[in-house]
């Protein structure tokens, strides 16, 4: 079933500046792209869980063990501003 697609509208939504030749080529290719995407949707089975990666992945974390703390003076050394031995930051909540 042929579908009419407004290439200029799609390009504007995607914020793409297409030349006339690109618009013409995409107007011929887009129906094929959409039909292939529809075929992929048909293949999806309910017994197959959705995945983000083709192969299983897992994170490797180090053990969460207490370590020696950074000395206060060393921590404050990189601060742009210090007030009362603490980092000074701009107020983000208005007080009434």
Image (spheres, rainbow, N blue to C red):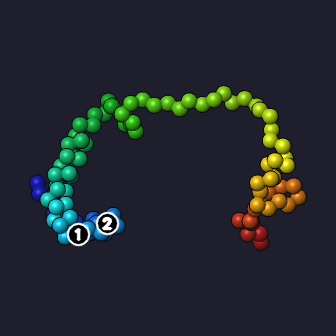
Image coordinates of residue 71 in percent, x first then y, are 84, 43
Give the labeled residue for mark 2.
16
Q: Residues within 10 Å of mark 1 (few under 14, many from 20)?
A: few
Residue farthest toward the left in the current orientation of the protein: 1
Image quarter in which the N terminus is found? bottom left
Image coordinates of residue 4 in percent, x first then y, are 16, 63
The secondary element bearing badge 1 is classed as loop
Label 1 and label 2: CA atoms lie apart by 10 Å
Image coordinates of residue 50 in percent, x first then y, are 37, 36
Image coordinates of residue 41 in percent, x first then y, are 25, 42
- What residue is rendered at 27% in x and 65% in y? 10
- What residue is rendered at 16% in x and 52% in y? 32
- What residue is rendered at 80% in x and 38% in y? 69
Q: Residues within 10 Å of mark 2 (few under 14, many from 20)?
A: few
Above or below: residue 57 compared with residue 84: above
Q: Nearer the viewer, mark 1 or mark 2?
A: 1
In which quadrant of the rendered view does residue 89 lie? bottom right
- What residue is rendered at 74% in x and 66% in y? 91
In which quadrant of the rendered view does residue 12 lie? bottom left
**61 left or right of 32 in image:** right
Residue 19 circle label: 1
């Amino acid at each position: 079933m042929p579908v009419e697609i407004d290439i200029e509208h799609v390009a504007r939504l995607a914020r793409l500046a297409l030349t006339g030749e690109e618009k013409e080529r995409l107007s011929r290719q887009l129906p094929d792209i959409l039909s292939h995407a529809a075929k992929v949707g048909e293949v999806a089975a309910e017994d197959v869980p959705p995945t983000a990666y083709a192969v299983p992945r897992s994170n490797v974390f180090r053990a969460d063990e207490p370590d020696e703390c950074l000395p206060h003076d060393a921590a404050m050394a990189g601060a742009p501003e210090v007030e009362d031995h603490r980092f000074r930051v701009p107020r983000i909540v208005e007080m009434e």
